[in-house]
């Protein structure tokens, strides 16, 4: 990433401190001079259309709903020379697989070390598509995940989600997005007692004890962002 390619950088997310920390890293290691910050997902596409950004950094936590369609619109409106890099609190193989289809430049867990992030962004700048940097080897980026382990993980994730009905998946998605029982009932036009029944059935089918554990599990498996 050189000075010319970082003239226009867009940072988007729901946590100002994370964006400021990322900005400081970019300034220190990549000589970023100009940037724009966005805290609402609906402002992303208009901003990208308005300016020809060389780099766009997005924290997936900014998306409250309809993230797949919005990400597709973002990718569609980015110029061919734009590097689109995403960050997540819940990195997982299913999430990686879903995002690879969108032709993004990189995906990193937010708990990645500064050293590995800098190295990963250098790889992205050179044209590589990077999905979490695990280590370095002979100057190249790679993921230390065996193919058999990857296949098993993806299979288990699909089987777990297939246990849930369509309505249970809708309830799960809203639970993960912080909706209360009453809010879910109003959005889906069902009673709060029905919502609780769905919640209990989801926990039972997935063999999970609490809603907190359920949310963590769903994010880890890439069922929601």
Image: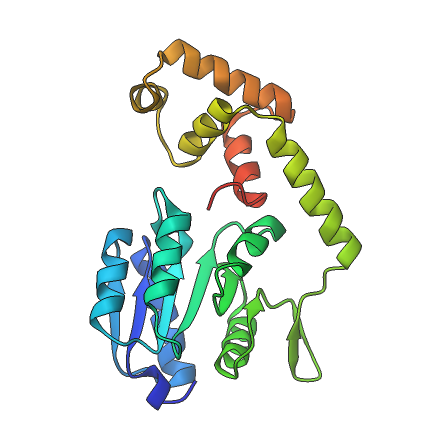
Q: In the rendered view, would you say 108 is above or below 61?
A: below
> Which of the pair 174/30 is nearer the observer?
174
Residue 162 on image: x %, y %: 62, 30
The image quadrant where one finds the N terminus is bottom left
Q: How many marks?
A: 0
Q: Image check: 106 left or right of 20?
A: right
Q: Residue at x 58, y 64 (%)?
A: 132
Image: 149 above or below 105: above
Relative vertical location of residue 190 with respect to residue 88 in this rendering, above or below:
above
Residue 131 picture quarter: bottom right
Quadrant of the rendered structure where residue 159 is?
A: top right
Percent of width and height locating residue 61: 39, 50
Which residue ends up furthest to the front in the rendered image?
76
Question: Residue at coordinates 54% horizontally, 25% vertically from top-left?
Answer: 210
The percent position of residue 120, horizontal first and vertical second, equals 54, 74
Q: Residue 145: x percent and y percent? A: 72, 60
* Residue found 39% across the figure and 57% down from its top: 72
Res. 142 image quadrant: bottom right
Locate residue 38 relative to residue 100 in the image: left or right.
left
Q: Residue at x 34, y 69 (%)?
A: 78
Does residue 39 appear to the left or right of 117 in the view shown? left
- Which residue is situated farthest in the right direction here? 148
Q: How is the image coloured?
A: rainbow
- For residue 68, side relative to residue 19 (left or right): right
Compared with residue 225, is residue 207 higher up or lower down, i.e. above or below?
above
């Amino acid at each position: 990433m050189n000075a010319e390619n970082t003239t226009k950088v867009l940072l988007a997310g729901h946590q100002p401190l994370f964006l400021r920390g990322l900005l400081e890293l970019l300034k220190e290691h990549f000589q970023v001079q100009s940037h724009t910050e966005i805290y609402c997902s609906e402002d992303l596409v208009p901003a990208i259309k308005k300016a020809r950004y060389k780099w766009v950094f997005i924290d997936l936590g900014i998306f409250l709903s309809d993230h797949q369609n919005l990400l597709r619109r973002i990718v569609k409106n980015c110029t061919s020379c734009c590097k689109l890099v995403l960050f997540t609190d819940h990195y997982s193989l299913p999430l990686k697989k879903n995002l690879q289809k969108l032709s993004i430049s990189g995906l990193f867990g937010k708990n990645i070390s500064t050293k590995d992030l800098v190295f990963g962004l250098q790889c992205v700048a050179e044209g590589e598509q990077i999905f979490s940097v695990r280590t370095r080897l002979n100057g190249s980026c790679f993921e230390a995940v065996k193919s058999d382990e990857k296949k098993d993980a993806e299979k288990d994730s699909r089987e777990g989600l297939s246990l849930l009905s369509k309505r249970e998946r809708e309830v799960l998605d809203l639970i993960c997005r912080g909706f209360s029982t009453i809010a879910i009932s109003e959005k889906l036009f069902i009673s709060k007692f029905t919502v609780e029944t769905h919640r209990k059935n989801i926990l039972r089918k997935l063999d999970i004890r609490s809603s907190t554990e359920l949310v963590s599990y769903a994010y880890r498996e890439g069922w929601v962002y």
